[in-house]
Image (cartoon, helix red, strand yellow):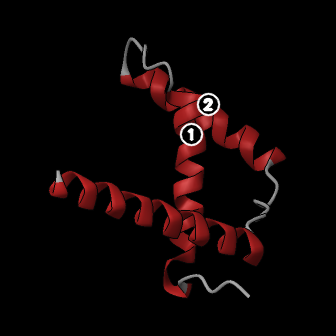
Amino acid sequence: MVHTPVHASWLNQVEIYFSVVQRKVISPNDFPDLTQVGDRLRAFEDRYNATAQPFQWKFTTSDLDDLLARLDRHTADRQEESSAALAA
């Protein structure tokens, strides 16, 4: 089981949504005025609400274990490099 912070889970969904807006609506940032930005955001909202699907979380406990093992190896390698550099 993977425990995520319950109090911040809604925040993750908001961050994902704004990431989608940034990539698909606002970029490139070449709007001549704020009216066009608002129009595009409203059009995107209508389209997104009509087609949106729940986000699928695919990060499993084995993925977490693999990530933690890689981080441990990376940290150990960095500590060895630092020790070698200090010894030289």
Where is residue 21, by image quadrant? top right
- The quarter of the rendered structure image containing the N terminus is bottom right
x%, y% of residue 18? 52, 48
Label 2: how many Cα within 10 Å (few below 14, some 14–19, many 20+): few
x%, y% of residue 39? 54, 28
Vertical arrangement, residue 64 with respect to residue 48, above or below? below
- Judge from the rendering whether residue 84 lies leftward or rightward of residue 66; answer left or right: left
Depth order, front residue of 14/45: 14
Q: Which residue is mark 1?
A: 21
Q: Which residue is mark 2?
A: 24
Amino acid type shown at disc 2: Lys
The residue positioned 58% from the left and 71% from the top of the image is 68
**Label 2 with label 1: CB-CB less than 8 Å:** yes
Mark pair 2, 1: CA separation = 5 Å
x%, y% of residue 38? 48, 31
The residue positioned 32% from the left and 54% from the top of the image is 81
Depth order, front residue of 73/37: 73
The residue positioned 56% from the left and 86% from the top of the image is 6
Amino acid type shown at disc 1: Val
Q: Give the residue at the far front of this rendering.
A: 88
